Amino acid sequence: MRKKMAQLDKLRAKVHAGGGENKIDKQHRAGKETARERINYLFDPGTFKEIGAFAGDPDNNPGEGVVTGYGLINGREVYVYAQDFTVSGGSLGRVHSQKTCKVLDLAMRTGAPIIGLNDSGGARIQEGVDALNGFGEILYRNTMASGLIPQLCVIMGPCAGGAVYSPALMDFIFMVQNTGQMFITGPQVIQVVTGEEVSMEQLGGAVTHSEISGVAHFMGENEEHCLDMVKQLLSYLPSNNQEKPPLKPVKEPSVNKEELLNIIPDQSCLTYDVKKIINAIVDGSEFFEVYPHYAKNAVIGFGRINGQSIGIVANQPDYLAGCLDINASIKISRFVRFCDAFNIPLVTFMDVPGFLPGTTQEFGGIIRHGAKILYAYAEATVPKITIILRKAYGGAYIAMCSSSLRSDIVYAWPIAEIAVMGPEGAVHITHRQEIETAANPEATKKLLVEEYQEKFANPYVASSRGYVDDVIDPRETRQKIINALKILNNKQVVRLNKKHGNIPV
């Protein structure tokens, strides 16, 4: 037995050494940690348990280029697969795929989140169709796990070709600046096929995917920053779709609620930062923003109210006046559907002048993409609370979780303007001839605008029709949300039986 144990220790040490000192040094020189170093940083000390350590050839391909297993993160069970770039460049072959599929299956069976740490040269070419099938098996499991358990992916090195579709099927993608890259086709092939010259970082780096493509939800300055954000995100999420998010101790906002009276300017044409309002309402003034660099006219993220996790959606008047456009529609709708899948109540802060006009938006399919928000909110069965802060115009008012999309509770601040369109545009259409023929067109227009504002651009007409449940003092917003979440805690929705709907993708 002692001889066998010595052999076991020797083999385990060989597996833990990965590609050896030279490869590990090269990994460190590239500004990257090894797969095991990343796992040790991510998991609570001493809790990680490895699965499939002796898969593959221990002499030439120890561990098959991927470390898999489970452990605790902040005391909660989580599964992980971490590609090991020091072994065959982390390339994916048949056994590599089998190890990854094993932890995906276990995560689904046990109802625990899965985290993928990607750092791979792609498919193992010498394995041919086995490698391609291996990708397919992982992609199938990503699809089956969607809406069942949270799936988080961290791009910490190259991720190219068919490998990018596994992160794309997961819920959230984190990328490390300067070392993480994702693309379907690399710069060399692009140059040969199209003649276009582009660097790897320009084509598929963290900045590109966080600001332009919208592929990445989070961008970390380094690996530790990225993994810290992973831990932070997990703290807001349940382990699976049968649970509710964990409760945390209540922390009063650090921002004085009196500030809520001063954030929105008196003139409705002026902008402000909606995140100031969010920070004045959520626990500890702590808002964990998702997609902070993409489609900035919409703000989404997680916070807590009275210790309870909530998903927050808001228009951002500080950028494009808070209009809804194609990118914002995609950003909001996917987030709403994630929160609905994992029992996270939705709080929407509305200040929207409409959908962004123009040929670029129309030709790009704003009708199709804008419909995604309508679909996502209407489909969602979690508690839905809407706060109309200021502007609520036209179809965008409907889209931002109005009462007609079955928001459970709709509150409005006294300055709310709920109408088909803004006063200026409405008066121009309905009284154009009267204004043009008036002795003093400017004075006439001003008077008509004021009349329109008094009659329609306020929360009381909508309130009288039952579309707004209450007009509230802004300083009461946090308490109103707390009360609403309490009464909606056991909300149940019965739907007609169908296989699934057909969202306008």
Image (spheres, rainbow, N blue to C red):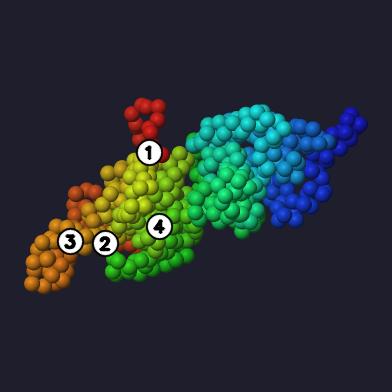
Q: Which residue is mark 3?
A: 428
Q: Residue flagged by tag 4: what amino acid is it?
A: Asn
Residue shown at the point (17%, 65%) measured from the top left: 449
* Circle 1: element type: loop
Q: Which residue is mark 2?
A: 414
> How many residues crowd around disc 4 within 10 Å: few (fewer than 14), some, or many (20 or more)?
many
Nearest to viewer (mark 1 / mark 2):
1
Residue shown at the point (69%, 51%) measured from the top left: 41
Q: Which residue is mark 1?
A: 504
Q: Which mark is residue 407?
A: none
**What percent of the width, then of the height, locates residue 353?**
30, 57
Point out the tag, 3 or 1, that comes first from the N-terminus.
3
Point out the tag, 3 or 2, that comes first from the N-terminus.
2
Give how far apart the Cα atoms at labels 1 and 4 are: 22 Å
> How many residues crowd around disc 2 within 10 Å: few (fewer than 14), some, or many (20 or more)?
some
Q: Residue flagged by tag 2: what amino acid is it?
A: Pro
Point out the tag, 1 or 4, that comes first from the N-terminus.
4
Whether residue 478 can be seen here: no
Whether residue 315 can be seen here: yes
Q: Which residue is mark 4?
A: 297
Give how far apart the Cα atoms at labels 1 and 2 are: 35 Å
Q: Quadrant of the N terminus?
A: top right
Q: Residue flagged by tag 3: what amino acid is it?
A: His
Q: Are marks 4 and 2 in contact (CB under 8 Å)?
A: no
Give how far apart the Cα atoms at labels 4 and 3 are: 26 Å
Point out the tag, 4 or 2, that comes first from the N-terminus.
4
